[in-house]
Image (cartoon, rainbow, N blue to C red):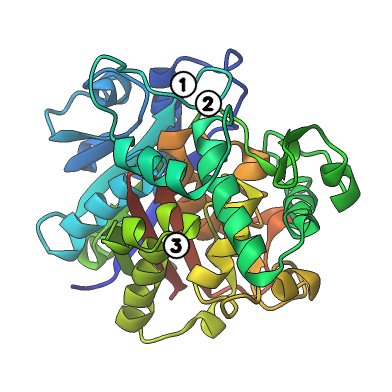
Amino acid sequence: MSDVIVAGVGMIPFAKPGASAPYHEMGTEAVKLALADAGLGYDKVQQAYAGYVYGDSTCGQRALYHVGMTGIPIVNVNNNCSTGSTALFMARQMIASGALDCVLAVGFEQMKPGALGSVYTDRPSAFEEFDAAADQLIDAPGIPLALRYFGGAGLSHMKKYGTPLDAFAKVRAKASRHAKNNPLALFRKEVTADDVMNDQVIWPGVMTRLMACPPTCGGAAAVLVSERFADKHGIGKEVRIAAQAMTTDTPSTFKAGDMMQLVGYDMAKEAAGRVYESAGIGPDDLDVVELHDCFAHNELITYEALGLCGEGEAGKFINDGDNTYGGRIVTNPSGGLLSKGHPLGATGLAQCYELTRQLRGTAGSTQVEGAKVALQHNLGLGGACVVTLYKRH
């Protein structure tokens, strides 16, 4: 398999539930932006993958038909919070295999306010085994599902390594410092670690409200092409997907008896390891990372899963400022999910948008100087994890 060119990316500003356009309009707009960025018409797209979680079947067609009706295959993708990157993964595979030369990935989500929950309550949940394992590991009655999982993972790290609660607050404060420079972030107000610690407590000793990302609506898209297609159509080849891996749960998810494993620590570690091996690099070669910070707790444990620091060393990594500008690896220059929000289907492609601009050197006030190698991590419970390595050519 050869490298795949990121020809164009597009993203619309994310919005609070009830304040956005309908899902299909958000998807349409993101696709138009990505095509314009690539300098291509929709007639050049040979196949499309449309990612969303909350919606009926064929919502992808509903969004794409307003860009064009060319009869191409449109595949609808749902993989929980990793949906956008799963669409990207499938698009990249088609090009890397030589099957196609121009493929579109789009993600969008129109969400409701409040904590995530099941839509179909008349059948077994995909989380039944996860819930049963969580019930054995933590005592958190009344805590909503996502908060219980990721807060529990953070609590596990605290118990194992003595990580203080304010380490998560520092992660959230860092996100706000980055987001103030990102016009597409929903929350751009800078907060301090003390502000985070003093915010509304939603799990005593484990989490305050500001440590959790909000439900959000939005859309993002990417156009991927082969090198021969780029040469034929005069498309810039600055940014390439040099390696990518997708993993799902292994027996350790349930057998380890650890909330960190239950929320995908091992999935992320395995995916990152495959990517590093495939690309022939290590985490020390990275300049910038966009990772799945649905909660500050998940950002902290993901530093270790991706090898940005050693196991048990995330607290020091944060305290030393190695996760921000001037440090070792700038993480979530966009402000991450904590500041942009998390429209499930769009999140992975919004990460792609940010990192593509970083490697092009066009990220404006969020630019990481001299960025040449970037890593993306997008995680969905239930579960799936996609890790993608981008390089500037």
Q: Quadrant of residue 27?
A: top left
Q: Amino acid at mark 3?
A: Tyr
Count of all numbered marks drawn on residues in the image: 3
Residue depicted at 62% across the width and 75% down the height: 312
Measured as percent of width and height from the top left, residue 332 is found at: 63, 57
Which badge, 1 or 2, comes first in the chain's sequence?
1
Residue that carries the numbered disc 3 in the rendered image: 265
Decide which of 388, 228 is in the foreground and name it.
388
Labels 1 and 2 touching (C-beta < 8 A): yes
Which badge, 3 or 1, comes first in the chain's sequence?
1
Decide which of 243, 302 is in the foreground and name it.
302
Q: Quadrant of the N terminus?
A: bottom left
Measured as percent of width and height from the top left, residue 75 is found at: 18, 35
What is the spatial separation of the Cα atoms under label 2 and label 3, in whole angstroms?
27 Å
Q: Nearer the viewer, mark 2 or mark 3?
A: 3
Residue 234 in view of the camera: no
Q: Quadrant of residue 301?
A: bottom right
Measured as percent of width and height from the top left, residue 44 is found at: 22, 42
Q: Residue 217 bears which disc, if any? A: 2
Element at label 3: helix
Residue that carries the numbered disc 1 in the rendered image: 110
Measured as percent of width and height from the top left, residue 165 is found at: 76, 55
Q: Amino acid at mark 2?
A: Cys
Q: Is residue 81 above or below residue 156?
A: above
Q: Amino acid at mark 1?
A: Gln
